[in-house]
Amino acid sequence: MYSFQPKQFGRYLLLDKIAVGGMAELYRAKVTGEQGFEKLVAIKKILPHLTAEDELVKAFIEEAKLAALLQHLNIIQIYDFGRMDRAYFIAMELLFGKDLQRIVNKSSAKELPINLENALYVVSQICDGLDYAHSLKDLQGNLLNITHRDISPQNIFITYDGQVKIIDFGIAKAAIQNTKTQAGIIKGKASYMSPEQAGGRTIDHRSDLFSAGILLFELVMHKQLFNGDMFQVLSQLREFEFELPENVRKKIPPPLYEILLKALANDPEKRYQSGGQMRSDIEDYNFQISSRSSARSLAQYINELFKDEINAEKLVMLEATQIDSVKESTSCVENPIIDEKIEKTLILAPGEQVDSNPTDLRKFNENEEIKLEQAPKKRRNKFWYAAIPAALIVISVFLVYLFSENPESYKIKAGIAALKAERFKEAVDLFKEVFAQDSSSKSQISNAYAQALEGRASEILITHPEEAEALLQKAVELNPGSKDVYLKLGLLHVKNKNYSKAVEYYEKAAGLDPQFAKTFFNLGYVYVKIKHYTEAKRMYLRVVELAPSFVDEALFNLAMINEKLGERKACMKNLKQAVAANPENEMAKQYLRRLTAKGEFLNEQ
């Protein structure tokens, strides 16, 4: 959980602190509105001890005023600006991904460099965003002359769905700004400066294009253009005519070399004069090499690169959405009628036995809530069905014991016999004894031991959840490829209302068997519990796509989510499909009749 205690900040609920810089701190926050509207945002606000520094406050205000003018797909979106508790703040788009610096570092560590197509796509998107910013005019038609001045890997952000965003206009300059940079004062990162910027001379938008050229060089060549400390880099740029290394011409195709040569020209007049020109040349080269670079291919690369981190970050985001506004919140609460309907009407999992009530379509038996995934088959209650096989097993075990010279072999055979008879505790104890010895038989019985642990955990899941979790964790160690163990771990955490852990285990199960519909069904249930309805909708759509025998129940749950999201036409459609798939689904039929009687969907049938 968070060490940061969520607190209200005007109409925003600050959920946790993402980062702290020299001037400002960044928070993940949530804003709520009418009819259950929720949106996660990033809040950037001046550090408390700097609020009295007039120059810093003025620079922060200028950044906000400038950023608010920029409305482009490749530039981070600004939503709000204001002052609260004597601190100025900016509310902006919350991005889910990594900055280019971390991507380059990770690609080097994993020896998985970005390919040419993705490199060209990234830089073309940067050029597109820069072209927009450089060309922006005010309401009177006057060019704003915006220059970012810090186009560097740290300020290029790539989301997990392949969007490229220019961020942090903190040191950008524009004609509308009142503040002026003193002569000789250098702002930005030395390794990504233009020669004129490094020399402290007057710069314009073409300086940003030189920086974009450096990024193109580094992404294509997989090495830094400038090496050394800040003073060494500045010296290279100030005192010498900068030229591309000789080996570059030999390693890349001539058309791409020409693009680099023009972007990295020392004289701004010989450089690209707009981001649009540079993007156009990159796209022409893409056409020549039949490149199909796109956001999708970039997303695939980023997701592969950070596959070990994405799930953990996703859980943090999901946990953040669970946090409700504090009592002092002035934001509107969600519609209680719709929320109650979702909670009481949603089917827990396929095949659940529940109580029905004419006044409430669905009420849960709390003792049964844990049965999202069925436990191993219960033993037969009739004496003779159980006694005869049990007697035979006892006799066979006794004979094995009499004639066996190896006690370990006896324990293994007895453990397997107990497992087949579903005497899980007995099987666990026997296998545990074998594993306690320095035995060569461990690998042979690891799967059987894991099954025994899983079965025993299922028996005590409700009465002794902590012990059950320990057994399941041991089962995972023995057989990490068992989706059933992960399902039960997810189930256990659903019972304990630890939904982030439940999601983690269910997603592991889904990864092991992407065709097992019940995993996605249970994931949908968890996402509803944490009010992450769009993700729940995606899970139930996946169940419908897999078309299991309980597809009608998935369609019913999907209809409930559609109503929550205001998708009335889809709600009616899914209810009809649920009834068509299973004419005996009484809940779907009753709900369909109720909505039709109200006339809520008459215009959409």
Image: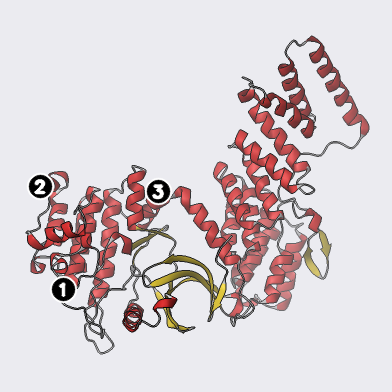
Q: Is residue 370 above or below residue 486?
A: below
Q: Determine the residue positioned at 78% across, 44% down.
A: 460
Q: Position of residue 468 (x, y in %)?
A: 72, 43
Residue 581 at least partly seen: no
x, y percent for residue 17:
49, 67
Q: Are marks 3 and 1 in contact (CB under 8 Å)?
A: no
Q: Which residue is mark 1?
A: 184
Disc 3 to disc 1, how far (Cα)? 41 Å
Disc on res. 246: 2
How crowded pointer 1 is (Cα within 10 Å; few <14, some 14-19, many 20+) is rated as: few
Give whichever of discs 3 and 2 has the lower sequence position. Answer: 2
Q: Which residue in the protein does label 3 denote?
A: 305
Residue flagged by tag 1: what amino acid is it?
Gly
Quarter that holds the C terminus: bottom right
Give the CA distance from mark 1 to mark 2: 32 Å
* SS for callout 3: helix
Residue found at x 71% / y 66%:
343
